[in-house]
Image: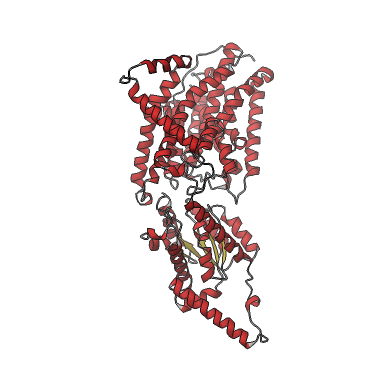
Amino acid sequence: MKEKTMKKSRYITGIDGLRSLAVIGVILYHLMPTTMRGGYLGVPIFFVISGYLITDLLRQEWQRTQKINVKQFYYRRMKRLYPALVALLLGSSFYITLFQRNLLNNLRGVVVSSLLYLNNWWQIKQGFSYFDRFTNESPFTHLWSLAVEGQNYLIWPVLFYLLVRFVKKRSTIFYFLTGMGIASAILMAVLYQPSGDPTRVYYGTDTRLFSLWMGSALAFIWPSNHLKEKIPSQAKKLLNVAGFTSVLFLLVALFFLSDQSSFVYYGGLYLISILSTIAVAITAHPGASLNRWLTNPIFAYIGKRSYGIYLYQFPVMIFYEAKVSNLADHIWLHTLIEVLLILGISELSYRFIEEPFRKFDYSQTWPTVRDWFARPIISKAKPWQLPAAIVTVVALVGIVTAPKDQVDAEQKEFQTEISQNQKIAEKTKQQTTTESSTATTDTVDSATKEEEEEVFSTNVSDIMKKYDLSKKIVEAAQIKEVTIFGDSVALGTAKNINEVFPKAVVDAQVGRQLYGTVPLLQKLAEQGLLKDTVVIALGTNGPATSAQFDELMAYLGDRKVYFMNVRVPTQRWQNDVNDLLTEKAKQYSNMKVIDWYDLSNDHDDWFRPDRVHPTVPGRIAYTRLLAKAILK
């Protein structure tokens, strides 16, 4: 491969600006999901930056030596990434072992898969959902992206060598990588199921490589050390317009492109990667102004610490929010506290872990350890190293002794209850709903009629007493046809609903959210199970957008629709969901909100320890509220 004369490698300060935008988006996506709907797009921005910088450095090495030292590549990557990752895993395991033992389950699998950079596939195998914000409580969820990068780092230097050694022509390599990226994006679209959970395509290395390889492809046709600082004014203007436009569109996407949109998986993420590639290209060009625009002390500070900020975000959020009972009612206060904690811990990590270990000469590891033990107990080096040793020992004990797929008594009881209610819900779909199936004929014996009336009267009396309902409401409920469509809260109440509404169709599922519901409702309609009265009980597991709500209402048409609002005091989207329902009730005349939140919020005794799923008194209150709202 023939190259122009080598120029000295330069540090592109504006890249820290792009990193800052990406990590701010990711953090706010988790802390303010209804405001920063597209913050998850910070990840493909990171991927493109990583692909470009790594490949650019490999090209410079090849130009200098006509060789690639793969061993040194892995060594440099490990020095940069491993110390902070190990510190995160040990520190979090220490905290879990002592203070939040409910998270010990499968801890060993998390740690091992993270250290091997296989966490994304481990999470997929375990059936974890990135988008179920309620049931998937883990301080390690975000490590999937590090695994994707790590797997790319493993194969990329070898593939790079093969390409530059045998293909040689830069344009051909560019087209090859671009084609492979398109294939990856197509695979994402093929594997994506609109009505299902998209975690598989979101986590999969095969369906996310396109962002990394687009950055790598750019490095072959846009090498940073061959770009000219002095360019014609017209070219500079063109670059500035392209750079500004790409960053502007990325910012808009960070705010508005919801992860629940099918467009994201049908090319949306690929489009974001293209915009990111343009932004990186213009930032890297010394003749354009974007690098200067993205260079400032704040971005420099955040960008240099972006890796630590990304690493520590989830542990801080999970550990902190587990100790807060009123998160939904004081969002801004708790968000500010969490941001300060994330920045503070990231600063400590940068100063005392990332930078020291990045500069450390690992060939001196044994002499350093030997020297440490030779020092007096009271010395400048040991005050912080002794606590680190204690943290490590406790963490290792937790990791080694952590149970695998353990279900405690509370979880087992809840799972049994959900399983039983699921069977009841399935039976409601199989029941005959035509009038002819229940109507009596003139040939029915009068004694039989009297027996049926007596049984019916007894049932009405029992239900009136159990649910504190009037005879009029109970009798109306016994013949009322209604479809209940919801999540685990509605599913856990299926037995009670079936007692009061024996003709109701209950279709509920653990982890269900508002997005992707229309195809499921269409399936119910095809089976004749979508009645003229529909109750929607969703919002426990995550927020929804106004557009998703409008799509749902458009499909339901002129049916009478009741929305049960939510009580999720430990989650930040509770009030957003309830506010959206209140707002939409003013827009749609055929819609009414059933206020479960207001009725239940002062009754912690109605709920399980998670403060969301109702116990027996709560399920009775839930069903009574439903009956009164529909039949009053």
Image coloring type: secondary structure
Return the residue nearer the eye: 517 or 433. Answer: 433
Q: Is residue 69 above or below residue 284?
A: above
Return the residue nearer the eye: 587 or 159. Answer: 159
Return the residue nearer the eye: 371 or 25. Answer: 371
Q: Is residue 73 above or below residue 119?
A: above
Return the residue nearer the eye: 616 or 594. Answer: 616
In the image, residue 76 lies at what x, y percent?
51, 20
Viewer can see residue 447: yes
In the image, residue 550 lies at what x, y percent?
52, 57
* Residue visible at 42% across and 16% down in the picture: 370
Q: Quadrant of the C terminus?
A: bottom left
> Which residue is outermost to the left?
378
Q: Is residue 67 left or right of residue 34?
A: right
Q: Quadrant of the N terminus?
A: top right
In the image, residue 592 lies at what x, y percent?
46, 65
Residue 616 lies in quadrant? bottom left
Viewer can see residue 594: no
Q: Is residue 163 left or right of residue 613?
A: right
In the image, residue 136 lies at what x, y percent?
50, 46
Q: Is residue 197 above or below residue 249?
A: below
* Residue visible at 65% across and 75% down in the picture: 437
Q: Is residue 80 left or right of residue 379?
A: right
